[in-house]
Amino acid sequence: MDKEKISFTFYQKFVITILALTQFSVVLDFMVMSPLGDVLMKQMNLSTNQFGISVAAYAVSAGISGLLTAGFADRYDRKKLLLFFYIGFILGTLFCGLATTYTMLLAARIITGIFGGVIGSISMAIVADLFPIQQRGRVMGFMQMGFGASQVLGIPISLYLSNHWGWQSPFLMIVGMATIILVMIVVKMQPFISHLDSKTENNVFKHLWNTIKNRNYRIGFLTTALLSLGGFMMMPWGSAFAINNLKITNEQLPILFMVAGVATLIIMPVIGKLSDTISKFKIFTFASIWMIIVVVIYTNMTESPLLVVMILNVTMMIGIMGRMVPSMALVSALPEMHDRGAFMSINSSLQQIAGGIASAIGGMILVQKTKLSPLEHYDILGYVVIVFAIANIFMLWRVSKLVKVK
């Protein structure tokens, strides 16, 4: 059955497009903080610690929000839930663009995280409701294109807008784009209420607890957490490593991100199709081994030409995204319909929290003696990522077995 290919209907294509666009806007909102770091710290007189807290505030609030909404996620029309949280996300992003002090910016990032952090899990629940497992690899491939598009468009456009109209302008651009997407959801998307016919625990706290205590679900949660721990551990330090160790210039950095982003846009649909036609677990395993080899090479590199760094970044992105698409497709097949909203909310929360923990672990491993000196122990960080990658192969094998049993 996993190899059977089913064509998408026109409405399914619309839902894929609109969910991919919502993901793009949410990811872009998170991504713009990185290229705006320097100008934000200078114009708002922020210390590096304050800027770090403002970035972490989003992930923490998103994780907590996901856990708090998990019990309610299967009690309402998923379209209404998506609209509620997307409106909150738009308002939070607007407040970011209007912030004039550190306190206002921090509060705005918390608000944006509370609402934006839940949108991904709602989207995943809608995907699981509308698309059978035979289509889900392709769907996940298109959904994850938001990550690549945010790199292609987010960094260069944000830098351009901030240089000409101030650091607030990228946030206001996202608000305008998201408002158009919101109107499309209101007008064109149908309600998603099929899960309401299923037997769902009336008490929201019991529903949350029943979802957490399900052994099969916990295997999925652990798989996602390990995937995020390994995946996010190197990401925050990518720019610093490229500049200080590989001697990439600040002018070359946007080009590096853009090339990796374009590669991601091309890779995602291909991996999605392969996941549906070959085997999701086999694709994940191959991508993991691929990534392990590239990580060993990349983390031990010294000063290198831009072209070499670009090629290594693209090959590493193939491994990273080659793991993400099939793993998300398999994990999404674990919950029963009446548990999907709660499952996806908890899963998304663990993803956010694990990403924050990964950044903290990376900060403890890495050493930079001065602002201009190379990062030390980046190779050790790579070896830790490899350990998580190996553990993830075993965990996703367990998930694949559970999905086949279903």
Image: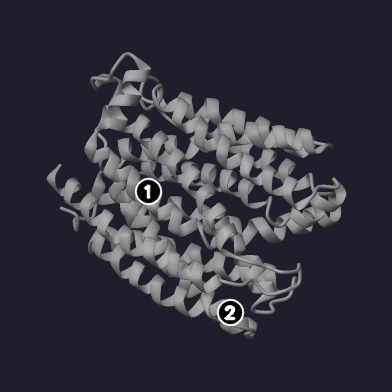
| Residue 127 falls in image quadrant | top left
* Left or right of residue 256: residue 287: left
Where 169 sits versus 160, above or below? above
| Residue 203 falls in image quadrant | top left
Q: Which mark is residue 224?
A: 1
State the SS at label 1: helix
Decide which of 285, 263 is in the foreground and name it. 285
Where 310 sits versus 359, above or below? below
Q: Are marks 1 and 2 in contact (CB under 8 Å)?
A: no
- Mark 2 surroundings: few (<14), some (14-19) or many (≥20) residues within 10 A: some
State the SS at label 2: helix
* Left or right of residue 114: residue 275: left
* Left or right of residue 52: residue 270: left
Q: Which mark is residue 89?
A: none
Query: Which quadrant of the figure contains the C terminus?
Result: top left
For the question of whether residue 283 can be seen, the reply is yes
Q: Residue at x 30, y 30 (%)?
A: 211
- Eye-nearest disc, 1 or 2: 1
Q: Position of residue 374 (x, y in %)?
A: 67, 74
User: What is the three-letter code of the residue carrying label 2?
Assistant: Val
Q: Position of residue 367 (x, y in %)?
A: 63, 66
* Left or right of residue 350: residue 395: left
Residue at the far left in the pictured view = 405
Q: Position of residue 369 (x, y in %)?
A: 71, 69
Q: Residue at x 29, y 40 (%)?
A: 218
Q: Which residue is mark 2?
A: 309
Decide which of 382, 93 is in the foreground and name it. 382
User: What is the three-letter code of the residue carrying label 1?
Assistant: Thr
Mark 1 or mark 2, earlier in chain: 1
